[in-house]
Amino acid sequence: MLPPFFTGVALLLGLNQVQTALAFIECSVLDYGAVADNSTDLGPALTAAWQECVIPQVTTTVATDVLLYVPAGNYLLASTVTFDGAENWNLHIAGDIYLPFNPDLTGTMLTFENCENILLNGPGAIFGNGYRYRPDGDLTLYPSRPRLIRFQTCNNCGITQVYLYDAPMFHVTIIVTHPTSNVAHDMAIIASHIGETDGFDMSGNNNYVHDVSVEVSNECVTVKTPTNGFVAERITCKWTAGKLGCNIGSFGSGATGVDVQNVYYSDVTISNSDAGVMIKSYPNCQGTVKNITYTGFTLDAAAYPIYISAFWEGGTDDTGTLEISDVTFDNFVGTGTPTRPGVLLDCNKATPCESIAFTDISLTDTVADTFTNACGTGLSGLEAC
């Protein structure tokens, strides 16, 4: 059952998007210069088909009535594409799209900006060839390497049934600064185990991620600021070994105005991860994180299974006032690692973590829990508020 703070908008936003339309307009990239030869740049054809066919023919509020269509075949995407200021259409990828290795390629390959009611779906795939940008695990050689997909200031948009492989940087970013409802669901992300390949980075209000599988060497499904109302359900995270499983943050050095509240994770499986769940910050941040629920987690060899840290990066100088409160950890089962605590809370002295609640925690292969500047209920050794 979804938490009461979640408005349900994200549950409703996909109804028109995923239904089968009785009739639709197809704007095929093959009619605008695309060639399925894995050599001709698909970028100009995507832009031309969108500008010359999609935009003039959008007449309804059903996204699947007008398709920007990438048919079956192998395509090269060698340039970034931005879809700015359009609404009510569907980028339908049936083929496979490959990124080249180009040290000068940067930015985001597919950006949806200032958009409303857009659907990106498969059954195709995007292959980022990210390992080429990180030879021998070197993450510093090409620091501006490209990301795959970004929804920027978008509302009522969705991504589903498309497979993403090995982005050079992050895979899916949904980031907004106003009320919004977007959904990512029923899809998989798989990356080489090198690093800096986040699965889903989410911010905004009432966003929803469900029924996804993420195998990357960084963060699985992560909440960024600002967020008010986020739900993640039925998530599988594998080999998130570079950083973490499902987390909130991080909040960078000196960040002010952090505002994350009403977050709900449920039915999550995490294996071979550097952490299970984490709220992480630099020690000089300011703002609020509150009303967070993690429930129904199964962990397998997760280092730091439950971790709140105001000192994740930036040393130990305790100057921050980040207020973390009303966080519930419920029904955690599985294994950690024998050299690290199952629960580690390390909060700012000026603003201790308050009302941290634990119920039904059953973790093995861990050392003793550690609490610093935190209070709550449910575990022996945790001071009551």
Image (cartoon, rainbow, N blue to C red):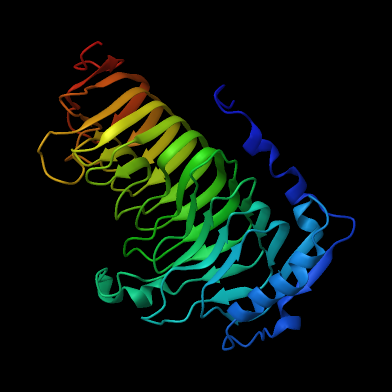
Determine the residue positioned at 38% across, 34% down.
259
In the image, residue 178 lies at what x, y percent?
52, 41
In the image, residue 277 lies at what x, y percent?
35, 38
Q: Is residue 308 left or right of residue 233?
A: left
Quadrant where the N terminus sits is: top right
In the image, residue 232 lies at what x, y percent?
51, 38
Quadrant where the C terminus sits is: top left
In the image, is residue 103 above or below residue 348? below
In the image, residue 369 lies at what x, y percent?
20, 27
Determine the residue positioned at 20% across, 29% down.
347
In the image, is residue 187 above or below residue 379? below
In the image, is residue 377 above or below residue 74? above
Q: Is residue 318 left or right of residue 299?
A: left
Q: Is residue 116 left or right of residue 352?
A: right
In this view, the residue in front, 251 or 137, is 251
For the question of whether residue 319 can be seen, the reply is yes
Q: How many marks?
A: 0
Q: Quadrant of residue 72?
A: bottom right
Determine the residue positioned at 31% across, 65% down.
194
Determine the residue positioned at 22% across, 43% down.
254
Q: Is residue 116 left or right of residue 175?
A: right
